[in-house]
Image (tube, rainbow, N blue to C red):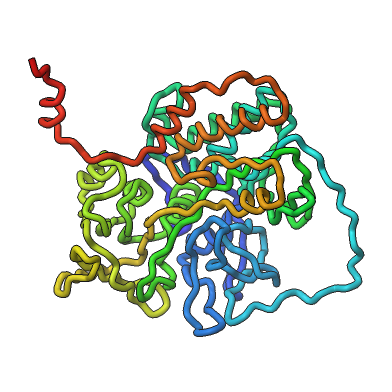
Amino acid sequence: MQRKRIDRHPILEIPENKEVAFSWNGEMMTGYEGEMIASALFANDIHIFGHHHKDNSPQGLFCANGQCSQCLVIADGLPVKSCMTPLQEAMDVRSVEGRPKLPADDSAVPTLKIPTAEVDVLIIGGGPAGLSAAIELGKLGVKTLLVDDKDRLGGKLVLQTHKFFGSVADSHAGTRGFEIGKILENELRTLDSVEICLNTTAVGVFSDGVVGAVKNGTYRMIRPQKLLVATGAREKMLSFPGNTLPGVYGAGAFQTLVNRDLVKSSARVLIVGGGNVGLIAGYHAIQAGIEVVALIEALPEVGGYKVHADKLIRLGVPIFTRHTVVAAHGKEKVASVTIAELDENWKVLPGTEKTYEVDTVLIAVGLAEVNEFYLKAKQWGMGVFSAGDAQEIAEASAAMFTGKIEGFKIAESLGLDVGEIPVEWDEKATILKTKPGTPVKGEERLSRQRDPH
């Protein structure tokens, strides 16, 4: 095992992977065949992927989800996103120093006539919403194509090691997220009318109703009667000095490295954001043997479920509300971070600064819908639907319900007699989208339950 690999985990199994050799700026290293280049680099303790062409500032990973270009590297002569490009034997990987040169234009390449595949429904995104919609459509025998840009189905479920809330029947309560992803995938693969295309990136929605997608470097065109956009969400960022340093990245990227790829990406982290994503990332870090020095939240209370916050506190992690990041420090990567308390006007209170030595600052300050394909398809007048975080930011359990609901709506729009959508689906989806309420102390709860007579 390499030095930065996780070789023991209380929940996740450690798989046997084929080790391959590759070079990084001419230095020989080893990684696992098929893992993302970014993960292989982190496993070799490489966090600086290049330097920006304008100011020579160091560049590193941020989203690990293909949504940005922070992790750009040169692989076998081509500029690629290292978080989305699988490692291969003898691959020559180099950092981006300055502006990368694009490959020469070969005008002798003939123009190819690309056939257009016709499908009843195209689903973009294989997370909880896309999977749930595909299952409902598959049960009805609707010809459906599901595409996802990752090498496996499940979306963010793949990154979740915690057990879900809710009910067992409706949202697999008591089951860990990555296991729910497998349950949904296994059910989907029994349905013959659904085709699954992984490692397939949708790149455009066009005015003639065609969706363009790329798989393994090959472009294909798909014309669906109905389109479902279940592309999830992207992480938001904060502005502060040092926020572009390698070592400042999203909680989703951290979970991808630690839970999906079993890379010990950090030694000491500080988490910014007290929503469920930040709180859960905290105990994902502890499960992987990574120290969490603190979690900070700008609001007076954490926004996530109290049970998650209490778990972190029991594990010895201090939670500071009404705090923000003042600056991240370091020359080539994060070496420390300074935080401070906020007053009622959201201004830093002088004299309240604290500095922690850390190598990672996790940003978990909210998500934004990835809905560009939905908006463009709507502009072109296509029969388009959205589900999951692409429709509204909520928990994965809510995404499963919105996927089921939209699957029914799509089938109905195709003229199928599907009957009424169960009223309880909408009711449960609404409940699952509801934000956490104000915590109630046990004594107060008991007093409210007493019969006033």
Q: How many marks?
A: 0
Quadrant location of the C terminus in the rendered image? top left
Nearest the viewer among 276 and 94 is 276
Residue 327 visible in image: yes
Rendered location of residue 124, percent (x, y):
64, 44
- Left or right for 423, reference 91: left
> In the figure, 323 relative to 97: above or below?
above
- Left or right for 107, reference 394: right
Q: Residue furthest left?
A: 453
Nearest the viewer among 335 and 239 is 239
Residue at 11% over, 17% down: 451
> In the figure, 231 relative to 248: above or below?
above
> In the figure, 353 relative to 168: above or below?
below
Rendered location of residue 288, percent (x, y):
37, 49
Q: Residue furthest top?
A: 453
Q: Residue furthest bottom?
A: 55
Residue at 43% over, 42% down: 394
Residue at 73% over, 52% down: 213
Quarter-of-image position of residue 195: top right
- Left or right for 350, reference 241: left
Nearest the viewer among 159 and 453 is 453
Rendered location of residue 16, percent (x, y):
54, 44
Rendered location of residue 245, percent (x, y):
42, 73
Quarter-of-image position of residue 185: top right
Residue 152 visible in image: no
Residue at 58% over, 74% down: 95
Nearest the viewer among 39 and 225 is 225
> In the figure, 58 relative to 33: above or below?
below
